[in-house]
Amino acid sequence: MKIILYLTLIFFFKINSYAQKSSVFINSFVINGKIILTDVSINESQEKFNFIFDTGSSNSTISKRAFDKLGLNIYDSLNSYDGLKTETTYQTIINLSLNQEKIERLKIDVIDFSSINEMQCEKIDGIIGGDIIKQYVWSIQKDSIFIAHKIKAFNANSYQKFKISSILYDTPIIIAGFLNDYSATMLFDTGDNTLIAIAEEQIKNIDIINKTRGIGTVYSTVFGNKCIDTTYYLKPKSPFLLYYSDFYINNVYVDMNHDDLLSSIGIKIFDYFDILLDYKKKQIYFKQINKNYIKEKEFGFKWKVHENNNVFITFLWNNSPAYYAGLKLGMQIINVNNIDVNSNKYSKCEIYQLIRSELNKKQEITIKVKESSKEYLLKKTDWD
């Protein structure tokens, strides 16, 4: 009898140890500077939903489209006042699964994404925010994501451990900066499509050797485009550095953050590091995979499909191929690579997908605009 009990205990502890050390793979892909988790199911539904993985968002959300499709009910409502108007946020309760991991009775905000091209046309169903992220340890690489309940599930010995200096509203803050230069607390924000965005008020503290001006709507977040008039693309003199380490990125360029006093580290950090994120113990682990800045080749402009399906140039960088070709902010695009994007035969999302496909896949494009009979030829370069 004692032998049977002994063997039973050994079996139990082995199973328990395996459960603590095992990790779960989460299907994902990266599109337009966002990590999309595709292994999300709701209320035991067989359908899989697409949720953005966003460490910069304190709360998880579900789209109104998914809310309506699943026939969910409003659980609660919250009113907020920004000094100008009162806004109401509705909440529902769901059972959410990340592959095999289940989170029961999750209170989640309901957000209408229909006015945001990227969210609507890429069928984004919600956001996995800090309230869920803090329940697990996450292994995040450029092409894969795993979750576990314990750091032991991963080979953390091959990483260098850093302390998360604080967790602000369920979003992690770490210390970083530039070698022999400025350093500060920075938000680790996977919902930001940049590498590094320095708060506008802090730019004066950095030794900048090159500055490129841009005008218009500069960039998008999971909640839509950020509308500003002027921004700058900056080249600091010194390498970017994770403080208290020898991890750095040479010849780096950074963006300007107009919204907050806080600088941020965005999704492009995964071009340079594999990361383990452990909210519970306030620890983040880095393993460097690349030390040299990757300068992407771009056309140098941004665009948006408006409600009437007209396409307008919404942002333009100086010194870019678009700038030198003669394109102007506010021009209406009617043709891209001989595709008539002003045609009534396409829906808003079809136009969005057509243009995005041409711009992402081609190194050279032609553009026609309503304001001119000229055909504009653009070639992707790593301009600055």
Image: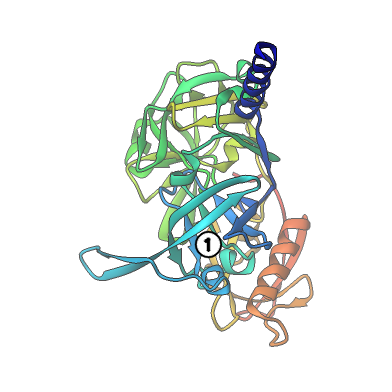
Q: Residue furthest bottom?
A: 344
Instruction: Please give the count of numbered marks on the rendered protein.
Output: 1
> In the rendered image of this protein, does residue 375 appear above or below residue 362?
below
Figure quadrant of residue 250: top right
Q: Nearer the viewer, residue 100 or 352?
A: 100
Residue 227 relative to residue 253: left or right: left
As drawn, 210 above or below 6? below
Q: Dividing the image into 4 quarters, which one contains the N terminus?
A: top right
Q: Quadrant of the image for the C terminus?
A: top right
Of the pair 220 and 313, the residue shown nearer to us: 220
Lateral position of residue 354 relative to residue 249, left or right: right
Reading the image, the residue beneath label 1 is: 315
> As rendered, which of 196 and 129 lies closer to the eye?
129
* Residue occupying image coordinates x 52% and y 36%: 136
- Give how far across and how far down residue 171 sits, in percent: 41, 41
Name the quadrant containing residue 15. top right
Q: What residue do we see at 42% from left, 36% from top?
A: 172
Q: Nearer the viewer, residue 113 or 331?
A: 113
Residue 19's x, y, as percent? 63, 29
Q: Position of residue 362 (x, y in %)?
A: 78, 58
Q: Residue at x 42, y 29 (%)?
A: 174
The three-letter amino acid code for the residue at tag 1 is Phe
Report crowding for label 1: few under 14, some 14 to 19, many 20 or more residues within 10 A (C-alpha).
Answer: many
Left or right of residue 290, residue 51 in this image = left
Q: Relative to 240, say whether 333 is above or below.
A: below
Residue 49 horizontal/vertical position (percent): 63, 60
Give the image's coloring scheme: rainbow
